[in-house]
Amino acid sequence: MQREDLEHIICAAAALTKESDFIIIGSQAILGQYPDAPQALRVSMEADIYPRDRPELADQIDGSLGMDSPFDATFGYHADGVSPGTATLPNGWTRRLTPICNANTNGATGWCLEVHDLAIAKYAAGREKDLRYTAALLNAGYLDPATLDQRLRDTAIDHEVRNLIAARIRRDQARRRDSDRRPGDQDG
């Protein structure tokens, strides 16, 4: 997905619901903070979205702009109407949202998750595609380890889940360090 595609989805969702503010919580939220994100972060052709003030209208978005809709068939990308509880997010995430609002959105605003909040949501979901995504975030240099650790501490989850996410983060960071080492480099 390109930034312009997400802008089009925001505009279409606004026209459909008559709402002007939307939360973007899925992988394509990266396009708020990084409009030219690497292709590995833009693989998905769906935007997870809900109206900020009327999340119950997400079903309308899903029905009219969702997968296999005429919108999807015409443009090759679609909206997935989700709910506020879809993603596991750190406390304070709403204060860090990145807005997309321009002529392409026709004045509507798509509020996109900040990259560290997005990473925590993906680590918490833990599906294979989510873990590929978090690895790509690290490889792109978008994640600060200290900020990521703080966001994990700020997430209201049970101890077992927190430990699982922390292990996933450590694994990705170790893989990144290993891939940064060139052949022939020696420790010591």
Image (cartoon, rainbow, N blue to C red):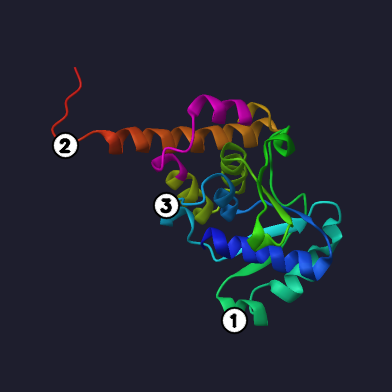
Residue bearing mark 3 = 38
Q: Residue at x 20, y 22 (%)?
A: 187
* Callout 3: SS: loop
What is the crowding at mark 1: few (fewer than 14 residues within 10 Å), some, or many (at least 20)? few
Front-most of 19 and 152?
19
Q: CA distance from mark 1 to mark 3?
A: 25 Å
Of the residues shown, which amino acid type is indicated by label 2?
Pro
| Amino acid beneath label 1 | Thr
Marked residue nearer the N-terminal end (2 or 1): 1
In this picture, is 147 found above or below 10?
Answer: above
Q: Main secondary structure of the magenta part?
A: helix
Kindly identify which numbered label has been placed on residue 74: 1
Earlier in the chain: of badge 2 and badge 3, it is 3
Residue 168 picture location, percent across and down: 50, 38
Q: Which residue is mark 2?
A: 183
Residue 73 visible at all: yes
Q: Are marks 2 and 3 in contact (CB under 8 Å)?
A: no
- On whether residue 46 falls in the magenta region, the answer is no
Magenta segment: does it hold 138?
Answer: yes
Region in magenta: 137-151
**Residue 41 horizontal/vertical position (percent):** 47, 53
Label 1: state its secondary structure.
helix
Q: Secondary structure at mark 2?
A: loop
Coordinates of residue 48 in the picture (x, y in percent): 66, 59
Q: CA distance from mark 2 to mark 1?
A: 47 Å
User: Quarter of the image holding residue 114?
Assistant: top right
Chain-order first, disc 1 or disc 3? 3
Residue 157 shows up from this direction:
no
* Vertical order, 142 against 127 (above or below): above
Identify the residue at horizontal 64%, vertical 37% (top origin). Answer: 161
Q: Nearer the viewer, mark 2 or mark 3?
A: 3
Asked whether, in this view, residue 32 is left or right of residue 41, the answer is right
